[in-house]
Every structure is written in structure tokens, then in C-alpha cells.
Amino acid sequence: MRGLFSPKSLVYSIYSKKLEREVKRSNNIPHHVGLILDGNRRGSSILGIPKTMGYQKGADKFEEVLGWCMELGIRVISVWIFSTENFSRSSDEVHAIMELAERSTIKMRKDPRVHNEGIRVMFSGETELLPDSLQEEIRQTEEATKDYENYTLNICLGYGGRAEITNAVRKIARAVKDGILDVEEIDESYIGNNLYTRDLPDPDLIIRTSGEVRLSGFLLWQGSYSELYFTDVFWPLFRKIDFLRAIRDYQRRRRNFGK
């Protein structure tokens, strides 16, 4: 119990509340935030727990962060859970992640918060590469939340930015080949409408944890003018104060969109 009232925790609590008030006072809250959840394995080493438990800690952390986003009125959240490149990891690790993804998808569909707050859940990626049972849970979850309009949670699972653009090019090429589309009609809007996120606004802010300073293929097209924020904190150890610092940093930037 002493830790709850230690000087360090007291200072953290005071600073966190001050930072939250500062962020909320601004009318510049990002509408769409993208999250690259990096550092689950390294975070598990720091916590002294198995890697598979680190992924569970990461899933629990995201539930927290979703709440923080909703507190600020962030309406669209895109979260990168698993990339197409991650399929090359050991079969045991991939299997454990897929099982966790399936459990988390079922839990999300049954979560009263999703239905009470009107959160539409959608999945972006090459979902046909996922286990059949997970594909079915995804289908049921998207169907159960498709009419919600207050928030959108876009879960990027089996996702790769290059693969997304490649798939869009194939769709457009087929439309041209079939005589449905004239080449001169292809513009940025048409390409955007053939991406996984066709009905979502582009992200205003993309946050990546773990100290890696790159996007690694996350929302390559959509993130062209996104503000980027990188933090050294590993995802399972990501705190509300880290999240608020990212939002405050975003609020202090001047966005010109190339003008």
C-alpha cells in the first residue's frame, strides 16, 4: 500500500492531472489516431514474464488506451496488432498471437462498452491469411457493430501497407481491364476508395512505442500528412502520461499540409 502514497506516485498523479487539463483545454484534439503497438516482447523481458504473457499485457494495455482516447473525444482509432511480416515468426509465437487475437475479438464483441458507446469495430488486412475460427469471430464482430457511428476502432491484423496498396492497384487494374473504368478517371480519391480504410479519414497523429523511429509500412498512403510521434516506452509499459504527452506534442505543432 505504501507505493500508492509514495512521493513519486503523488508527483506522477499531480503532473498527469495537470497535463490532462492542459490537453483538454485545447480544441485541437486529433480526430483519428493511429497506434503502432511495438515492444511487447521487450516489455515482457523488463517485466520478467514470458513473451506470450507480454502479448496479453499488451492487449490489456490497449483496452486502457481505448478508454483514454474516448475520454478525449478521439473518434477514430487505428491500431496495428500484427503485420504480414510477423507471419515469419516461429509457429508457436504466431499461434499464441492468433489465439489471443481470437479471444480478444470475442471479448470485444461482448464488451458492454462497445455497444453502450457505439463503437464500430472493423478489421483491416489480409484477413484471409488468418485462422478460419478467427476469421469467423471477425465477421461476427464487424456485423454486430456495423451500424454504430460514435467511434470507429480499426484493427489492423495481418496488415501491411505495401500489400494494401498492391491490392488496391489490382482492383483498379481489373476495373480498367473490364472496361468499367477509364485510365484518366484514376485519381487520389479513387485510389483511396480502394484501400482497406476507404470510409475513414486519414490519421491526424500516428504514435509508435518502443523507440523505433519508422512506420514499417503502417498506413503508408493514409499517413502521408500525419504527425508522427515516437516514444521509447515499450507498449505494455505505456502510461497515460506518455499518451497525453503525445497528444500535447501534436497540439503544439503547426500543420501546413504542404502549403
Image: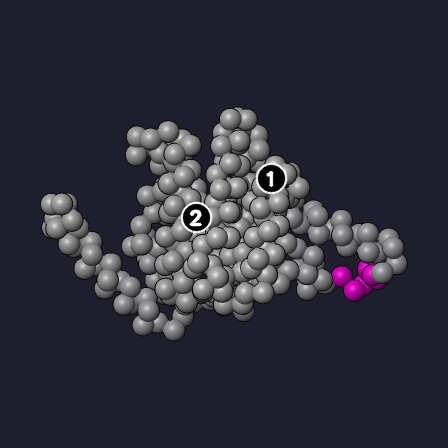
Instruction: Give the residue type at disc 1.
Output: Ser
| Numbered badge on residue 208 | 2
The residue shown at (43%, 59%) is 113
Which of the two marks, 2 or 1, is nearer to us in this view?
1
Q: Residues within 10 Å of mark 2 (few under 14, many from 20)?
A: many
- Residue 149 appears at what percent x and percent y? 54, 67
- Residue 250 appears at what percent x and percent y? 40, 62
Magenta residues, as a range? 181-186
Dot 1: element: helix
Q: Is residue 23 above or below residue 214?
A: below
Dot 2: element: strand
Instruction: Give the residue type at disc 2.
Output: Arg
Q: Residues within 10 Å of mark 1 (few under 14, many from 20)?
A: few
The residue shown at (49%, 65%) is 118
Q: Which quadrant would the C terminus be assigned to in this image?
A: bottom right
Q: Which residue is mark 1?
A: 133
Q: Is 233 part of what is drawn in magenta?
A: no
The answer to whether residue 55 is seen in the rendering is yes
Asked where in the image residue 10 lies, by quadrant, the reply is bottom left
